[in-house]
Every structure is written in structure tokens, then in C-alpha cells.
Image: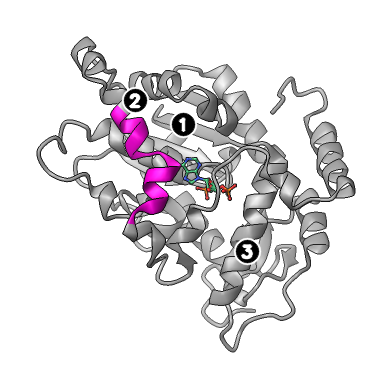
Amino acid sequence: METNMRYPEIISALPKREGLAPSLDFYEYQGFWFPLVYLEATITLQEHFKANPEDIFLCSSVKTGTTWLKALAFSILTRDRFIQSPNPLLNTVPHECFPHMEVDLGDDPSYRTPQLPLLATHIPYTSLPKSILESGCKIIYICREPKDAFTSYWHMLQTLKHLSTGPDAREPAPSLEEELEMFCQGKSAFGPCWDHVLGFWRASIERPETVLFLKYEELKKDELFYVKKLAEFMGKPFSQEEEIEGVPEKIIGMCSFRNLSNLEVNKSGFYQKGRVYNNSFFRKGVVGDWKNLLTEDMKVMIDCTTEQKLQFSGFTF
Ligand code: A3P
């Protein structure tokens, strides 16, 4: 057991998979596999987090376009504020523009960015703090096709390995084959990704007025449509004047992979007290990059899992 583990009586009884270091060990809690640090924060949030009705939650599993959605939502909601002054995205990684719940609120669940109703989280739908669902807050979810999400996750793990080389590091790190096996079993960060998606998708069918469900691939195909949809959903639609001035297009340009990935702040520096490189959130940003990593057998393995997991659900990627 971890010496300083929070909630040791709950956590030490859970099924466990070793991660790159003890703080990154995975525990199966309420049907999903959480890295330890985020599990501790999740339990704290389940006990203490109080949502405000006007809060808007950006939800996602990992490596599905969270960073992009954060940049877009932030730019849409703050567009009046930064006409004269420089947009904070020019020198702040999108993750630091407002709190990511299990990263930033574990010690102080009441913290909010002044005058900004945005919060983000990877916590699965069924494990969200109760007050989020009870207060009828708006939720925006983004999902991504699992082969690309896994490919992005695998590359992210390679960057984390460099940061997990302390005395606690577990070596050797899992091979691609081993990690893929774990992913298909759901034993990866916030996995199973299929169950994660289905939780929010079902909620979006039941309550479309409060849950907006997006797909990374569709957002890529028609950014203008979805940026307008996001603005409307968040209660800040673009005026005719703004549309004539091309404000939605400017936001799309500011948040584009090309722009964000070339900013100095996103090319250098660290997020989460040194745990993650900022540039690891900006790798390629394309659809179908799994073809450059996975063999035919690996592709089939993920596709079969997807088929089984989504059977009878009505949902397709
Ligand atoms: P790749 O690794 O496939 O390039 P998350 O933000 O949830 O961690 O997801 C990261 C993925 O989103 C990475 O995918 C990253 O390159 C991509 N991404 C980041 N910013 C993006 C943007 N502005 N537009 C499109 N994709 C983006």
C-alpha cells in the first residue's frame, strides 16, 4: 500500500494493475480503471464537489480531443474579453485556462476560474459527483475512434516514461502488444473507453438539452458547424455581426492544431507539476494515424472489441 495514499481502506481493496510508477498504478473503481492520483481526487470530488447550475463540464476519455475542445470552448466563451488584449491561449497551455477536476480540484473542490463557468474532467458519467447531474448543468462530451485514441495514448505513454524514471519507476514498461491487450480489457486510463463513451452518449439521447455529444472526426470534418453549435449550446451564440466579421473562423484558426502546436508555450514546458510535457498534447492531430502504428492483427483486435462492446447499443464511431 502507498504510504501517503488517501482513502487507503477503499483503494487497497480494489483490483489493481501496475502503472509506470506507483502514483500511476490503475485501480478498478465503479467499473473503470483510474490512475491512483486521479482516483484519490475523484473520491474527494464525489464527496465534496458542489456544482453551480451555470457550470459547463467538458468531459472526455483520454486522448480523444480534450485539449482541442478546451481551447474551443474557452475561446468561444471569452471572445468579448480578448478583442483588445492578447488571448491567454497564446501563452497558456489550454489545460491551464480553467480547472481539470481530478487534476486541479482534489485539494480544493470549490476552486473556479473567476468569471468562467468551464470545468473539464475524464471521470466517467456514472462516477461524476452527484451534484453535477442533480443541478442540471450542461455537459459537452468528445469521443474518438478507439484505434486512433489508443495510438495517441500509446505515444503519450512513451513521453510519460521519460518523466517516470525516479527511484519508484517500474521497468520495463509494457510493450505495445501488452498495452494493447490491457486497453482491450479496459485496463487503461479511464477505460474501458467504450463504456466511457456509452455512458455519455446515452445521457445525450435522454437529455439532449443538457448533454452535447461530439465526435473528434466529425469536428475535424466540419469545424464551423460545430463551433457554432458549441456556442449555441453554451448559451453564447454568435450574432449575425460576429458571423459577418468571421469571428467563428478566427476562433477555429486560433484553436487549430497548426496554430496551437507552434506556440512556444505548447512546444516547451510541463503540465501537472512536471508530470506531462505540454507538447505531448499536440502530436499529429490527424484521423487514421493508427495505420502508422498498428499491425493488421492489432487493428482486428481493437475492431472486434469495439464490435462486441457496442453490440445492441445503437452507437457507432
Ligand atoms: P494524436 O496523438 O493522434 O496526434 P487529448 O487532448 O484528449 O489528450 O487528445 C490529444 C489528441 O488530440 C492528440 O492526437 C493531439 O495531437 C490532438 N490534438 C490536440 N490539439 C488538437 C487540435 N487543435 N486539433 C486537432 N487535434 C488536436
**How many callouts does the rendering have?**
3
Task: Write down the region rendered in magenta.
Answer: 250-263
- Residue identifier under label 3: 157
| Mark 3 or mark 2: whose residue is earlier in sequence | 3
Give the image's coloring scheme: one colour
**Residue that protrudes farthest toward the left in the picture:** 84
- Residue identifier under label 2: 234
Left or right for 45, reference 151: left
14 or 117, nearer to the observer: 117
Residue shown at the point (42%, 65%) measured from the top left: 272
Of tags 1 and 3, which is closer to the observer? 3
Q: Tell me how far mark 2 sits from mark 1, CA to CA.
A: 9 Å
CB of residue at label 2: within 8 Å of ligand 1? no
Q: Which is the main secondary structure of the residues drawn in magenta?
A: helix
Q: Quadrant of residue 8?
A: bottom right
**Residue 220 sits above or below residue 289 on the image:** above
**Residue 154 sits above or below residue 85 on the image:** below
Looking at the rendered image, the quarter that the C terminus falls into is: top right
Left or right for 224, reference 159: left
- Residue identifier under label 1: 140
Inspect the image, locate mark 3, and give the three-letter code of the amino acid beneath it: Leu
Q: Secondary structure at mark 3?
A: helix
Inspect the image, locate mark 1, and give the three-letter code of the amino acid beneath it: Ile
| Mark 2 or mark 1: whose residue is earlier in sequence | 1
x, y percent for residue 249? 33, 25
Which numbered circle lies on residue 249?
A: none
Residue 146 visible somewhere in the drawing: yes
Residue shown at the point (62%, 25%) measured from the top left: 202
Residue shown at the point (35%, 34%) measured from the top left: 253
